[in-house]
Each structure stands twice: as C-alpha cells, then as structure tokens.
Amino acid sequence: MCGIVGYIGPRDTQEVLLDGLEKLEYRGYDSAGIAILADHHISVEKHRGELANLRNALAKHPLKGHIGIGHTRWATHGQPSDQNAHPHLGPEGKIAVVHNGIIENYQYLKDTYLQGHTFKSQTDTEVVAHLIEMFYDGDLFAAVQRTLAVVTGSYALVVMCVDDPDELIVTRKNSPLVIGLGEGENFIASDVPAMLAYTRRCIYLESGELARVYRDKVVVTDLAGNVQKNIVDEIEWDAQSAEKGGYPHFMIKEIYEQIATFQQVLSGRIHADHVELENIDLSKEEVERWDKIYIVACGTAYHAGLVGKTILEKTLRIPVFVEVASEFRYRDPMIDENTLVIVISQSGETADTLEGAREAKAAGAKVLAITNVVGSSIARESDMVVYLWAGPEISVASTKAYTSMLIALYLIGFYFGDLAGRVDLRKEQETLRALEKLPEQAAEILEQDRIQQIVDIAKEYVDVEDLFYIGRGMDWAVVQEGALKLKEISYIHAEAYAAGELKHGTLALISNKTPVISVALQEKTFDKTMSNTEEMLSRMMDENGDISGARVLVVVKEGHKPISDKIHHVIEIPDCPDFISPVLAAIPLQLIAYFTALERGCNIDKPRNLAKSVTVE
Ligand code: AGP
C-alpha cells in the first residue's frame, strides 16, 4: 500500500519527509519520491527501488524549503519506474500531488476533460494533478473540490501548489490519512509511525473530508467546504505496534484489511451488468477456441485455484484442471494453443509457478497471471494480468491475497463467460450484486462478539495434536486452505478431507482426541455434509453416547442450523449465494488459525521453516 507524507514548518523538510517515508517502509513499496516547494518552484526527486536510491540522489542535490510532500509507491496502474513514482505534477508544474488508492474513472477523465494533455506516466494519479491544475484559477481549495466532484475511486491525496506556499490540502476517501499536530508545524502521513518522532497529537481525517493544513492551524471541512470540528486524538502506540496499526501481528491486521481489499479488487471492474478487466484484449473467437483451462499455483494460491475450478467450469463450461506448480511442469501436460493457463501467485515471484508459466507459453498456450505485485516476474512474462490490488502482504501466512484471488477468479469467470456467451445472465447479475456486498459482510464477520466466539473456540485447540477439516465441493476447497493456515502458523497437524471420502479409510483415525471442523455452505450438499459430520461425532462418543475431549465445530450460513444437537460450536457467516460463500468462509478459518497460534505462543508472522516468497524450485 502506498505511503504518504507531508510537512509544513521550520525544520529541514527533506529530512522530515525522508524520515517519514523510512518509517512507512514496512508497508511495502517499489519506488519513492519527494517534492519541495521554494521560491515559486516545485522541485521533484523520485526513483524506482529502495528509499536509499532517493536518499543518494538527494545527498548530491538536496532540496531546500519549508513545505513538501513525499510518497512510497506500491504500483497499481503502471510498472514500478522513475516516471510512475510520485509526486506527480500538473502540465505546467504548478500542482504536485501524492496519492494512495485507485482512481477508477481515470480513463474517462482523460477522455472527457484532458484531451490533448500529454502525460509523463502511466498512472491514474497524474490525471488528478492535471485536473487540479486545469481547474485552478487562484483558489486551490476550489480546484480540489471541483476535481473530487468528478473523480470516482478511493484516495488519500495531498496537494501542493506553487502559488500557495503556506498551505497543503489533503483529502481522503476509503484510504487512510492522519494529520499530526505540532507547534508552528504540521505533519501528514498515511500512518502514524511516520510522525511519532515529532508529535503524538493527531487528527484522523474522516472519509469524505478535506483539510487545509497550515503551519499554525488545520481547518477540516466537508466536501462542500463547511468547517468541521477538529477532533484531536493522542497516539498511545509505541513505534512497533504503530506499524501494525495497533494490531499485535501483521496477520490479524491483514485479516481485518479484507474489508478494504474486497472493495479494492472489485474497484472499477463491475459495471452495472458486466465485468471489465484492464490488460486483457481478447476476441470472442479466441475465448471460444479454448477447450480446457489449467490453473497452476502453489500453497494458498493453489487452494484459490481449487475454488477457481468450480467458478470457471460454471461460467465457461469447459474443463478446468488445477495443478500444483512444482508437479505441473514435469508432467508433460497436454497444452496447446487451445488451452488457457492461469497462473496464480501473490508475490509473482514463486519459482515453481514462474516455470509453469514459461512451460505453458512455450507450448503455445495463452497465459493469464493473477498476482498482487505489479511488475513481478510472473506479471511480466504472462500474456495478460489481473492484479489483486490488495496492498503488500507482510505476514508469511497469506490471508487477504487469498480472498482477493477468489474474487479475481469470479471476475475473470464472468468476463470470459460473457465474451463466449456462455454465462447465465440472471445468475451473473445476482452474483455481481452479491460480490458488491462482500466488504460489508466481511465487516460483520469481524465484529467483536463474533471474534470472541472464535477466541473461545481456539482455547480448546491449544493442546490438540491432530485436527480434521471436512467439506464438499467448494467447501472442500475452502477447508484445504483452512487446514494449511492452521498447520503453518500453529504447527498443529491438520487434514482437510472431502466429507464423503472419510468413510473410505480416514474415519479410522477419528477419536475423542481429534476435533473436527465441518464447513457446510452449499445447499445441495448440506444434508450430506451434516450426515458425514454425524459419522465423525459417533466415532468420538464413549459407550454412553457422551463426548469428552475433542469438539465438533460447523460453519454454516445464517439460519442454517445443523441437525445434531451434539455439535458443540456453530459459526455463522452472513447469507450469500452458495457460489461466492468461499470468500466469506475463509475469514473464520483464518481467525481460528490465528487465535489458536496465539494461544500456543507461536511466531505468527514468521512461522518456523517458512519464507514469504519461495524463489527456489
Ligand atoms: C500461504 O500462507 C503460504 N505462505 C504459501 O502457501 C504461499 O501461498 C505459496 O508459497 C505461494 O506463494 P505465492 O502466492 O506468492 O506464489
């Protein structure tokens, strides 16, 4: 996620900005830059790569001044490069802007308001700088207001103007922004670690608000310019917990971020009755020619692929095969120009998946990448890319990237299904509307009373050695990810089974020492999964029909009560079409893994023996 800083005051602005950007490095970035205003001129220095590149350049040509803005970029539109790095300037260099978020209608804005403009970057942000400069007629605040009236998307913006050296204008919608209050100086940042060295007093700008930031005052307004009351908070976090937004671990922070990442991956891609995907340019004939799809990925991304199989078979009506990347390339798979190969990778650098993509291309297949990292090797080497826009994932255990992969797969399924004319349009409408509801439903699952239920359940798993997950169809795919999550961070042995398959052998392992988590979210298999859950319950009972020890937990949709009263715990997820339930079901399973690992005192963000990005085969 991009990091923003701003400063106005008597200190060495360059140092304050660089220091702030350094404190935001944990958010992940691919380039960094600053702009400082002095003597009616805005000077910009920006570089791809490490902050050190920017520091080295500035050491040779320091920028002096008492007002400035800075940015660490995590690419969404346009590759990581010097040109695409922020700040961005208006056409005459009068306006400088840094931005975190996504301007959804940037192409429309270019076509409608900015015809004839030349852009130096491929970013959505530069459009905002051009718009503000075009609307500017001596009143910066009014120019920002006019710009916001035509922009759609999410943003945190800081704007600086050559004609207005005593003021920074900031605004935000669905992207974070904090204003730090000093004595005769003020600070702006996406996150508090950037300002902790200078102040602990701050204003958290509300979504839809603007603020005029001067040296000695801050004026907060609504979009119409009506002045709002300044609510000043005291930051109590230490530097380390501030990086995690006050959460004890990145993993739980990232689980909560799903409320926003669900929104981000959908952002600008659903249009009333259809899906639009950037970076994909295929004809109906090309899509119709595909006779099969391979999904190639590792670990959590592979589990997303398992859900993807059902999605794509339903929307495209052709067979989909899901393959572990390390196996795929040595299997001599049947691929040719009539095959679509989808590679899924959060990092875009996983060696096995990258080699799978290369193998597929060499065999003549079209390769579509689903990844979170713009400019990653997998993104560069594939024919088409759908980005997750989930922001950097820091915890080794993947959470928000997984659910964004699932949502991306729905979007891809409907996009290609529509192109080929194979989609049931009524079903598509229903699903698209349901996808749009996911962010608010994620927020419901993450409400405190629901969390407390999971915290209590997790306490029961502290001394468990083996745990079984069961489900059918899409639920089976979901429990495979649930089990992996528990294994990798709590070190409990967990197995995920197709519920109907247990009786063919594995049921022999079930006793009152093996808790069971059963996921039953598919209407058509609900009763069957419940019967399989009962089969397990009866293997856990003593001769009096009592169960001591292991517990059984079922995950169902609101209102779908399990039949047996022997079941110990029921976790409900909000009502949604069965088809998209995997996205919501993932969250309680992530939470179970997290709180179990927490109870067991494990190193949650950096589990033993594991690395975030696996670049060896
Ligand atoms: C997820 O929790 C794991 N750490 C791991 O399985 C991961 O998903 C896998 O290594 C693939 O990574 P990628 O998505 O970056 O390719």
Image: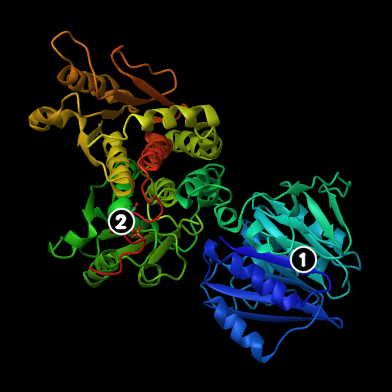
For label 1, the crowd category at 10 Å Cα-Cα, with few meaning under 14, some 14 to 19 and many 20 or more, is many
Q: Is residue 110 visible?
A: no
Q: Amino acid at mark 2?
A: Arg
Q: Secondary structure at mark 1?
A: strand
Q: Which mark is residue 201?
A: none
Judge left or right: residue 131 versus residue 462: right
Closest to the observer, 473 or 597: 597
What residue is disc 2 on? 608
Q: Secondary structure at mark 2?
A: loop
Residue lying furthest top = 544
Q: Quadrant of the rendered structure where residue 498 is?
A: top left
Q: Is residue 103 above or below residue 6?
A: above
Of the numbered discs 1 and 2, the one sitting upstream in the chain is 1
Q: Amino acid at mark 1?
A: Val
* Rendered location of residue 260, percent (x, y): 56, 47
Q: Is residue 249 visible?
A: yes
Judge left or right: residue 460 versus residue 494: right
Q: Is residue 532 above or below residue 616?
A: above
* Rendered location of residue 563, percent (x, y): 30, 13
Closest to the observer, 310 or 405: 405
Report if the CB atoms under discs 1 and 2 are less than 8 Å apart.
no
For label 2, the crowd category at 10 Å Cα-Cα, with few meaning under 14, some 14 to 19 and many 20 or more, is few
* Rendered location of residue 171, percent (x, y): 75, 55
Q: Which mark is residue 159?
A: 1
Q: Quadrant of the rendered structure where residue 536 is?
A: top left
Instruction: Identify the residue at horizontal 40%, vertical 25% (top origin).
Output: 571
Q: Quadrant of the rendered structure where residue 288 is?
A: bottom left
Closest to the observer, 303 or 431: 303
